[in-house]
Amino acid sequence: QFSPIPAYPPALRDLAVVVDAATPAGELCGVAMKAGGKLLRNVGLFDVYTGKQVSKGKKSVALSHTFQSEDRTLTDKDTQKAFDKIVKSLERQFGAELR
């Protein structure tokens, strides 16, 4: 199915959280997608880190978020509301901590 190229640019936001090493990154993406609302177009995993800077038994997972509107250019205020909901959902469901 064809869909036209969006006339307005996407707003990109990255987020890194520390979670238990056993937590599947795909589940983090799914929860973020549900919590992000109608402006969130995509959530992608771009890094998983375990090492000296992260506690033993934990990992850092970095996600990229693409927000876009079909009728206007988004502002930081528009994306911040959705971003805050994503962070709270990850904290609540996985005990995630911002890195």
Image (cartoon, grey):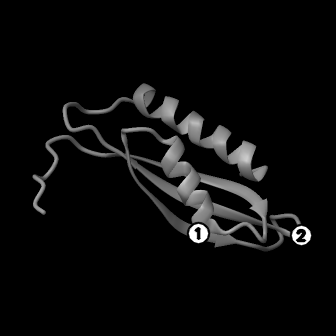
Quadrant in the picture for residue 37: top left
Density class for disc 1 (Cα within 10 Å; few <14, some 14-19, many ≥20) is few
Residue 87 screen position, x and y as percent:
63, 42
Query: In the structure shown, which secondary structural element does the residue marked by tag 2 occupy?
Result: loop
Residue 44 screen position, x and y as percent:
47, 62
Q: Which residue is mark 1?
A: 47
**Residue 98 shows up from this direction:** no
Point 81% across, 65% down: residue: 53
Q: CA distance from mark 2 to mark 1?
A: 18 Å
Point 61% across, 58% down: residue: 28
Lateral position of residue 34 relative to residue 53, left or right: left
Residue 91 screen position, x and y as percent:
73, 44
Point 87% across, 70% down: residue: 57
Query: In the structure shown, which secondary structural element does the residue marked by tag 1 occupy?
Result: strand
Lateral position of residue 92 relative to residue 13, left or right: right
Density class for disc 2 (Cα within 10 Å; few <14, some 14-19, many ≥20) is few
Residue 85 screen position, x and y as percent:
58, 35
User: Is residue 31 depicted above or below 38 in this figure?
Assistant: below
Which three-letter amino acid code belongs to the residue tagged 2? Lys
Give the residue furthest to the right.
56
User: Is residue 82 depicted above or below 12 in this figure?
Assistant: above
Lateral position of residue 98 relative to residue 75, left or right: right
Q: Mark 1 or mark 2, which is nearer the start of the sequence?
A: 1
Which three-letter amino acid code belongs to the residue tagged 1? Asp
Q: Which residue is mark 2?
A: 56
Lateral position of residue 90 relative to residue 30, left or right: right
**Residue 61 shows up from this direction:** yes
Quadrant holding the N terminus? bottom left
